[in-house]
Image: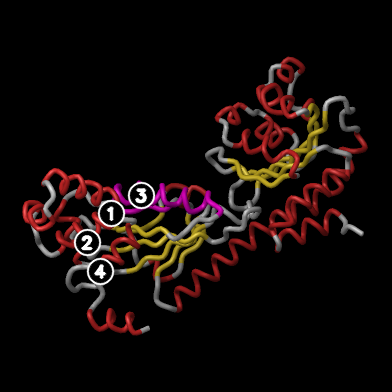
Amino acid sequence: MDLPTADQFYEAVFLPELWPSACEALAKEVDASTATIFAIDEKGGYRFVCTPNIWEGIMRFSSDPRRFDNPRPARALERFPFTFTRELDLLSEEEYENDVVLTEFIRPAGMNWSAGCVFQEPSGHLIMFDLLRRKGMEHYSDGEINHLNALKPDLARAVFLASRLAFSEAKVMSNTLSSLGLAAFVLGADMKVMAMNGEAEVLSPRITTGYRERLVLESKATTSLLTAAFLAVTSSVMGTVQSLPLMSANGQEPLILHLLPVRRAAHDVFGRGLAILVVTAPGKQGAPDMRVLSGLFDLTPSEGKIARELAKGLSIEEISKLHSISMDTVRTHVKRILTKTGTNRQPELVALLLGLSLPQQESNHSLRT
C-alpha cells in the first residue's frame, strides 16, 4: 500500500531520489496527467523535479529563453499567493490563446489544462507546483482545487524542510572548518552569503559582502572566475571542487579560494544551489609542484611545465630554448595560464606561483601520508 502523498513528500526530503514518485502521488490526487515542482532562482534559472512522463518536455522548457515570457509565476504570487489556482484565473481569454508556454510547450506535449501554486521559500527561490491534464480531459473543478489547497501546507512544509536541511548541513560544514582554522562562507543563490565563520569575517575587505549580501572580492578578475565556477558547481549534479587564486593589489599574500558543492543528488533541486567557499593561504617556498598547479587551475601538462619554469625565474626566451618550442607558443601558453589563474600580468602570476609551494617540511609530510 502506497504512503499518503504528504508522507511521500516528507520522505523525499531525506531521500531526494523519491521526488519523482512523490510527484506521481500528487498527480493522482486530482487525476492530473503530470506534476512538476520548479525551483526558480532570482535570475530566472529553473531547476525541477517531475513525473517521468513529462521530463523531456520540462527539460526543453527550462532551458529555452521563452520561459521568461511566462507570466504565471509573478501573477500567481501577486494575486493568489500560496494558493492553488487554474491558469485561466491568471490569464485573460486572449492571453491564454496566445500564451507562448501553452502553444509552444504544453500543447505540443499533448497537454492542455494546468493548475498550480507559487510561493517564495527562505533562500529567495520561487517554488512553483504545476499540474497538467491531457487534451480531451475536463479542466480542474473547484473541488479538486480545494483538495490541492488542503494538501498545500504539507507540500510547502516539505519543500521548506528540504531547503533548510541543505542550509543546516552547509552551516555545520562551515563550523567544522572553523574548528580546523579555515575560513568558510556558505553561498546561496546568486552567490549570496548566507553564513560565514569567524575566520571568514576577518578577511574583510579583501572578501566581504555587498548589495543584498552578495559576495564581493577585491579582484575583478577573480570575481569573474568565481562567478563562472559557482554556476558550474551548483548547476551540475556532478559538480566538483573548483579552486581559484585571489591576488592583492596592495602586496598582501595571495589567497586560494576553494568552492565546494554542498549536495549533488540528481533530484535534490531544493538543496542544490548552495556551495561552501573555503579560503586558504599558500606556502612560501620554491617553485610549485606541477600536481598542485594542475589540480588548482586545471592547467594542461604543457601549461603546468611553463608555469613552473616562470616560477623559477626563466624568461619566455629561455623557456622557448629549454623546451625547443617557439616563443609565440610560449606566449600563447602564458596567456592561457593568466586567464586560468585570474592574474593580469606576468609578475603577478610569478608572485602567485611562488606562494603556492608548501614549506619543505609539510611537503615531505604530505608525501609520507
Q: Kindly report which numbered mark, 1 or 4, lies closer to the viewer in this rendering.
A: 4
- Looking at the picture, which amino acid does disc 3 mark? Leu
Q: Main secondary structure of the magenta part?
A: helix
Residue 73 in the image: above or below residue 329: above
- Locate residue 198: give its quadrant: bottom left
**Total number of numbered discs in the rendering:** 4
Residue placed under numbered mark 3 in the picture? 225
SS at badge 1: helix
Assess disc 1: are there few (<14), some (14-19) or many (≥20) residues with their C-alpha within 10 Å of its C-alpha: many
Q: Residue at x 73, y 17 (%)?
A: 97
Residue placed under numbered mark 2 in the picture? 352
Q: Residue at x 41, y 65 (%)?
A: 278
Residue placed under numbered mark 1 in the picture? 341
Name which of mark 3 and mark 1 comes first in the sequence.
3
Tell whether position 220 is magenta.
Answer: yes
Name which of mark 4 and mark 2 comes first in the sequence.
4
